């Protein structure tokens, strides 16, 4: 069978096309065939059973009531349009939809909806209600939908990866569940990864539920890549409404870039993401917005030696109700680094923006209009000395700005360098644990002159004292705050948060489908 498009080649392209054609023919498996379902094979199971490496199982549009499918290594399974709305495999709650055991990277699953898979049990065999990848499986899963699959008492309602490295691109995970009861809970409502190097690019996670940990995703000893993904309205009963990362120092750490976490919830801590037991992912160019945790840490929580690098991330309107940081909370063993991050209108009982039990570092961050109902609208710190370099802390509403709890005789207190603290309703540099730093180390108090806070444009006016060389206390400080000049003597963009991110963060953003 010849490749498509040969007839369109002409002129000088003919010789190049001939070379490509010969190379493709020499690489193609001998006897590769297209298995048509249902025209030739009545079921997808029959088509897969007949297929060999190099074959394509091409499925006509429709709904197929099948379960316990076994994917073949090197085979391509695809709907006839390549769109998941074309073909639905509905397991009707009778079992897992599909298993991929040890399949190679030449294995492709494309344009399929996996629905109503159901698996129940405590062992790893009962993980993955939609698809289970195991024993070194490395399939390409492209443009698929995982809908309403359940892992009962297991992990990974939609997809579970055990010692595997699937590549998952442009897929949607919606309404999947890791379900349990009061005595036995499950983790990873949509996805669970154990000792796996999975990659998720351009994927959407929405309305997934975990009765335990990780409303959308549970990553255990798995240096997973999450790139340009959306996590919305996922929930966990215990902790980590969107994603949970644990044991990052064994195989490596996850990478989370250009992702949005919005309106995820946790009945415990960590409305969106939690890192635990030395999990220290690289998090960059992301947005945490409107996430909520009943017991604290509305956006991101770090526990037990978890020290991620967080760069160009916006934390907006997250709610850590019970305390410990409306946007971010971390314990005494964790030492994260935050650079060029925005903390805007976050809330908690203690620590409207930050709840710090450890001594992390914050460089070029902006804290604006965060609030706490009890202590520390900007910062709640306990027995720790977080360091703030070149930051802006402005316009936190009524309430204690900083609350420092320290053991008597131990020199714990936050440290500030080249930082502007200004316009906070309860006072600026007047708090016991920072008053000695008011005029030291380049610190000062002056209106940062944001371009247009009414439209969430926190770039700086051309006359801002926070621009490089403008600092009244120490002109050598450089830029202060998360963003540079956006209005005044230079050309401006329309004052919207999207344009702020486009200018000072990644230019290309993933579009939520």
Image (spheres, helix red, strand yellow):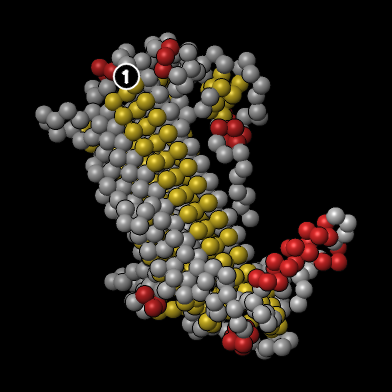
Q: Position of residue 296 (x, y in %)?
A: 33, 47
Which one is nearer the viewer's eye here, 512 or 236? 512
Would residue 246 appear left or right of 79 to someone viewing this image?
A: left
Asked if one can make out residue 19 in the rendered structure from this viewpoint, the answer is: yes
Q: Is residue 453 above or below residue 128?
A: above
Single out the residue that lies furthest toward the right. 11
Image point (36%, 15%), residue name:
442
- Occupied quadrant, residue 328: top left
Which one is nearer the viewer's eye here, 312 or 6? 6
Q: Position of residue 238 (x, y in %)?
A: 34, 59
- Occupied quadrant, residue 45: bottom right
Image point (58%, 87%), residue name:
49
Q: Position of residue 472 (x, y in %)?
A: 42, 10
**Quarter of the image containing the C terminus?**
bottom right
Would residue 404 appear left or right of 296 to someone viewing this image?
A: left
Give the total number of marks visible in the rendering. 1
Q: Is residue 412 above or below residue 267?
A: above
Asked if one can make out residue 324 in the rendered structure from this viewpoint, the answer is: no
Q: Quick one: SS at disc 1?
A: loop
Single out the residue that lies furthest toward the left. 409
Single out the residue that lies furthest toward the top. 472
**Quarter of the image containing the N terminus?**
bottom right
- Occupied quadrant, residue 50: bottom right
Image point (68%, 88%), residue name:
41
Which one is nearer the viewer's eye here, 417 or 133? 133
Image point (28%, 53%), residue name:
277
Number of other residues with Cα within 10 Å of mark 1, as a class: few under 14, some 14 to 19, many 20 or more: many
Q: Is residue 333 above or below residue 389?
A: below
Q: Is residue 252 above or below residue 318?
A: below
Residue picked out by circle 1 = 429
Q: Position of residue 195 (x, y in %)?
A: 37, 64
């Amino acid at each position: 069978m010849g490749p498509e498009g040969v007839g369109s080649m002409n002129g000088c392209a003919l010789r190049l096309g001939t070379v490509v054609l010969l190379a493709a023919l020499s690489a193609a498996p001998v006897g590769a065939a297209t298995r048509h379902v249902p025209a030739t094979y009545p079921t997808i199971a029959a088509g897969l059973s007949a297929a060999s490496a190099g074959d394509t199982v091409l499925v006509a549009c429709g709904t197929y009531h099948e379960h316990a499918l076994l994917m073949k290594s090197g085979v391509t399974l695809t709907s006839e349009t390549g769109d998941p709305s074309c073909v639905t495999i509905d397991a009707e709650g009778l079992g897992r939809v599909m298993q991929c055991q040890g399949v190679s990277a030449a294995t492709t699953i494309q344009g399929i909806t996996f629905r109503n898979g159901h698996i129940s049990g405590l062992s790893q065999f009962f993980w993955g209600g939609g698809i289970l990848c195991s024993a070194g499986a490395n399939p390409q899963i492209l443009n698929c939908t995982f809908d309403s699959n359940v892992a009962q008492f297991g992990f990974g309602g939609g997809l579970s990866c055990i010692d595997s490295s699937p590549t998952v691109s442009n897929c949607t995970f919606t309404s999947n569940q890791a379900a349990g009861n009061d005595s036995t809970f499950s983790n990873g409502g949509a996805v669970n990864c154990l000792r796996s190097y999975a990659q998720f690019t351009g994927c959407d996670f929405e309305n997934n539920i975990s009765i335990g940990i990780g409303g959308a995703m549970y990553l255990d000893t798995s240096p997973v890549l999450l790139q340009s993904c959306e996590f919305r309205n996922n929930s966990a009963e215990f902790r980590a409404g969107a994603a949970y990362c644990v044991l990052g120092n064994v195989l490596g750490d996850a990478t989370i870039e250009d992702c949005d976490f919005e309106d995820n919830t946790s009945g415990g801590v960590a409305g969106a993401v939690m890192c635990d037991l030395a999990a220290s992912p690289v998090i960059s160019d992301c947005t945490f917005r409107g996430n909520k945790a009943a017991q604290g840490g509305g956006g991101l929580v770090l526990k037990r030696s978890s020290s991620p690098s967080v760069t160009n991330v916006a934390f907006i309107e997250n709610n850590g109700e019970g305390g410990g940081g409306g946007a971010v909370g971390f314990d005494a063993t964790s030492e994260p680094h935050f650079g060029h991050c925005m903390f805007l209108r976050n809330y908690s009982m203690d620590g409207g923006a930050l709840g710090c039990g450890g001594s992390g570092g914050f460089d070029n961050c902006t804290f604006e209009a965060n609030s706490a109902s009890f202590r520390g609208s900007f910062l709640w710190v306990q027995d720790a000395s977080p360091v703030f370099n070149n930051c802006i802390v402005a316009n936190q509403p009524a309430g204690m700005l900083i609350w420092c709890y320290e053991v008597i005789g131990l020199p714990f207190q936050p440290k500030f360098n080249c930082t502007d603290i200004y316009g906070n309703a309860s006072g600026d540099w007047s708090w016991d644990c920072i008053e000695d730093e008011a005029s030291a180390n380049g610190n000062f108090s002056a209106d940062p002159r944001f371009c247009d806070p009414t439209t969430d444009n926190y770039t700086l006016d051309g006359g801002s004292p926070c621009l490089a060389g403008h600092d009244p206390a120490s002109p050598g400080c450089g830029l202060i705050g998360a963003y540079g000049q956006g209005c005044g003597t230079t050309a401006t963009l329309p004052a919207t948060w999207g344009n702020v991110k486009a200018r000072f963060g990644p230019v290309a953003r993933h579009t939520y489908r």
